[in-house]
């Protein structure tokens, strides 16, 4: 597990489907909604797809959906999921659990604004981009400092798009803007903490030979 100066292979994973995904509710608080039956099937497929991944550490948002997704990867490897508040979804603030389309549009536009560098944008009662990216940065720094070579982080669609858009090199801007991560969608990065290079965004391979 000791890396010395070798890069970290970091696999970022969006949680499986929840009941709030079906209703399009702005479900960003902990613990959040449970998985649907399809979501549990997605978790099983994810575990099978990643069966050969040499994961040495798994970190997760504390939401129910992320914990259940992460547990399917941790249990067969005898690992304990490291739950961290810093990996939770971007807060919807006063619009938490709203299914009003206007609120959803404001939330989505905020993420796009962050991707364009306008990190001061936030919803009423919510967090701005500097705060959200900063808390995610802190967990990634912990992953790097842990000494593992291969790690997985299970989090949420909006925070993964925003963080990768801000931190990952060689990631075409249109991918986090337009190619939304599906449930259990994955992003693979390689780096040492000071710089991350994206090698894969969901089904888009960015580096030849990338797993």
Image (cartoon, rainbow, N blue to C red):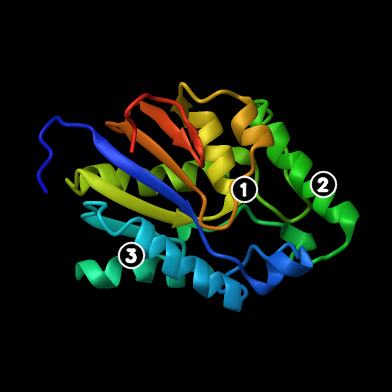
Q: Closer to the N terminus: mark 2 or mark 1?
A: 2
Q: Left or right: 90 with respect to 171?
A: right
Q: Closer to the N terminus: mark 3 or mark 2?
A: 3
The residue positioned 37% from the left and 49% from the top of the image is: 139
Q: Position of residue 151 (x, y in %)?
A: 29, 49
State how far apart marks 1 and 3 are (Cα): 22 Å
Q: Which residue is mark 2?
A: 106
Q: Closer to the N terminus: mark 1 or mark 3?
A: 3
The residue positioned 55% from the left and 31% from the top of the image is: 165
Q: Position of residue 82 (x, y in %)?
A: 32, 64
The reply to whether callout 1 and callout 3 are in contact (CB within 8 Å) is no
Whether residue 64 can be seen here:
no
The residue positioned 69% from the left and 29% from the top of the image is: 118
- Label 3 Cα neighbours within 10 Å, binned few <14 / some 14-19 / many ≥20: many
Q: Position of residue 181 (x, y in %)?
A: 59, 47
Q: Tag 2, which secondary structure?
A: helix
- Label 1 Cα neighbours within 10 Å, binned few <14 / some 14-19 / many ≥20: many
Total marks placed: 3
State how far apart marks 2 and 1 are (Cα): 13 Å
Q: Nearer the viewer, mark 3 or mark 2?
A: 3
Q: Position of residue 64 (x, y in %)?
A: 51, 74
Q: Which residue is mark 3?
A: 73
Q: Which residue is mark 1?
A: 158
Q: Is residue 15 above or below residue 34?
A: above
Q: Tag 3, which secondary structure?
A: helix
State which quarter of the image contains the C terminus. Answer: top left
């Amino acid at each position: 597990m000791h890396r010395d100066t070798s890069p970290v292979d970091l696999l970022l994973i969006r949680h499986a489907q929840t009941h709030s995904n079906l209703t399009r509710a702005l479900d960003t608080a902990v613990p959040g909604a449970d998985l649907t039956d399809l979501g549990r099937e997605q978790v099983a497929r994810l575990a099978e797809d990643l069966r050969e991944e040499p994961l040495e550490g798994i970190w997760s948002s504390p939401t129910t959906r992320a914990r259940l997704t992460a547990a399917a990867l941790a249990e067969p490897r005898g690992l304990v999921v490291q739950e961290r508040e810093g990996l939770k979804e971007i807060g919807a603030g006063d619009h938490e659990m709203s299914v009003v389309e206007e609120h959803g549009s404001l939330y989505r536009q905020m993420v796009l604004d962050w991707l364009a560098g306008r990190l001061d944008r936030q919803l009423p009662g919510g967090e701005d981009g500097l705060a959200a990216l900063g808390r995610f940065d802190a967990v990634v720094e912990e992953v790097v400092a842990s000494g593992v070579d291969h790690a997985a982080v299970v989090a949420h669609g909006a925070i993964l798009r925003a963080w990768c858009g801000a931190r990952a090199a060689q990631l075409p801007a249109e991918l986090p803007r337009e190619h939304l991560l599906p449930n259990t969608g994955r992003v693979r990065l390689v780096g040492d903490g000071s710089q991350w290079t994206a090698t894969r965004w969901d089904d888009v391979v960015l580096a030849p030979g990338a797993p």
